[in-house]
Image (cartoon, grey):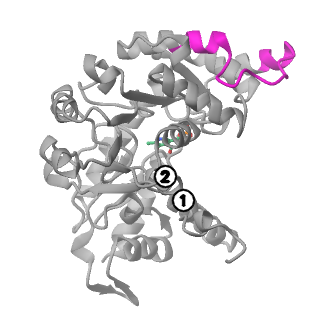
Amino acid sequence: NNTLSDKVNSLETSATLAMAAKARELKSQGKDIIGLSLGEPDFNTPQFIKDAAKQAIDENYHAYTPVDGYADLKKSIQQKFKRDNNLDYQPSQIVVSTGAKQSLYNVANAILNPGDEVVLPCPYWVSYRDIVQLTGAKAIEVSTSLETDFKMTAEQLEQAISPNTKMLWYSSPCNPSGSVYSEKELRALAEVLKKHPQIVVVSDEIYEHINFSEEKFSMAEIDFMKERTVTVNGVSKAYSMTGWRIGYIGAPEYIAKACTKLQGQVTSGANCIAQRAVIAALDAPISEIKFMIDKFKERRKLVLDLVEDIKGFTSNVPEGAFYVFPNVSDFFGKTIGKHEINNASDFSLFLLEVANVATVTGEAFGNPNCIRISYAASEVDIKEAFKRIKLALT
Ligand code: PLP
């Protein structure tokens, strides 16, 4: 469309949201679709958080909020970083935004110029590539595979870096692969980065609490990396608050200031009621949300057993988040019924149309051989979905 900007014309519609929309459309036509495409916990927000929001309304919170977040929320975030991540961030290094997605968008736009390069280990979360593209910078995709548990090695990082590299951007636990970088692996990446002081690291830790491994380490815990790492987090996943839209960063002060400046021209401060609720969420002990994490762990076992039962699916054991990311390339080049399968997108569409199960193609995450299946769904739905997938493939 000539009226629209080149920026928008070149942008992809978020694949996860597009799949959810397609599933909704089929549902409205009367099809019984099981949605395993979205990264959205199926729990209600815990009662004590809802109570804090109600109280905020009754206390007449209504006015514009400080652009970078309420001071007492930033205090809670400061304590959270100390408690959970052993990180000391001053309030001046913290910015609250309308979801971690806005935090990431702010950081990218605060740092990147056209022509800069961003190292993105694949698979990455869908929006990274498009946010990079919006800035005019270039994504340098680094492929990984099942053999390295979908993690980028130090050698791969070394090879991907050029004089134009400005940023390394990853999530751990990873959406979509569930992989968690260990302290040892992060230290190895940091040793490479030591030689390239112009590179800023964006560490997206939004799945921090949905981590079933013993590994729990942040890039910013490494002394010489703290001054050039942005730690991104939020409440959407662990607190089942996706629609409340609160995310935040801990960052070097000059980056935090730049994000605040940018946000001040776009959305201003995040929603007042949601911010009050998040204070209650972050101040509560982690034990308050453990029931959800335990449930995800049970479902992971269920899903891995079901994946193993399907001939042609091979998966890593995801250590965190709530997705499995099986390789389905065994089916490429085959025809099942009327459906010709040549890539992961064909396969995902086949599952939607024939099994009536919504998943997301790995192509959206920079991996053309896999599909992402979310297990943030009820056990009944998960079992039924795999029954249908198995039937569709036989
Ligand atoms: N980062 C990752 C890796 C995610 O999976 C998501 C949500 O799907 C986000 C960030 C965005 O989270 P929020 O809801 O806080 O914007």
Taking the magenta stretch, the answer to whether it contains residue 269 is: no
Instruction: Kindly tell me whether residue 139 is visible in this rendering.
Output: yes
- Per the rendering, the mark at residue 177 is none
The quarter of the image holding the N terminus is: bottom right
- Please give the count of numbered marks on the rendered protein: 2
Choose between 388 and 67: the one closer to the eye: 67
Mark 1 within 8 Å of ligand 1, using the beta carbon: no
Indicate the quadrant containing the C terminus: top left, top right, bottom left or bottom right.
bottom left
Q: What residue is shown at x 32% (from left), y 35% (from top)?
A: 198
> Given the image, on which type of amino acid does mark 1 rest?
Ser
Left or right, 30 with respect to 336, comes to right
**Residue 287 against residue 123 in the figure, above or below:** above
Give, as a single range, the part of the protein colored magenta. Answer: 54-77
- The image position of residue 343, as x and y in percent, is 33, 76
In the image, what residue occupies the spot 16% across and 51% down?
159
Q: Quadrant of residue 243?
A: top right
Task: Answer with mark 2 or mark 1, whichever residue precedes in sequence.
Answer: 1
- Compare residues 81 and 338 and report the one nearer the observer: 81
**On the image, numbered disc 2 is attached to which residue?**
127
Residue under numbered circle 1 = 14
* Residue 222 visible in this rendered orientation of the protein: no
- Measured from the top left, where is residue 382 in percent x and y? 43, 53
Mark 1 neighbour class, 10 Å CA radius: few under 14, some 14 to 19, many 20 or more: few
Residue 91 versus residue 292: which sits nearer the camera? 91
Establish whether ligand 1 lies closer than 8 Å to the Cβ of label 2.
yes
Can you tell which quarter of the image residue 157 is in? top left
Check disc 1 and report its element: helix, strand or loop: loop
Q: Is residue 283 above or below residue 313?
A: above
- Is there CB contact under 8 Å for labels 2 and 1? yes
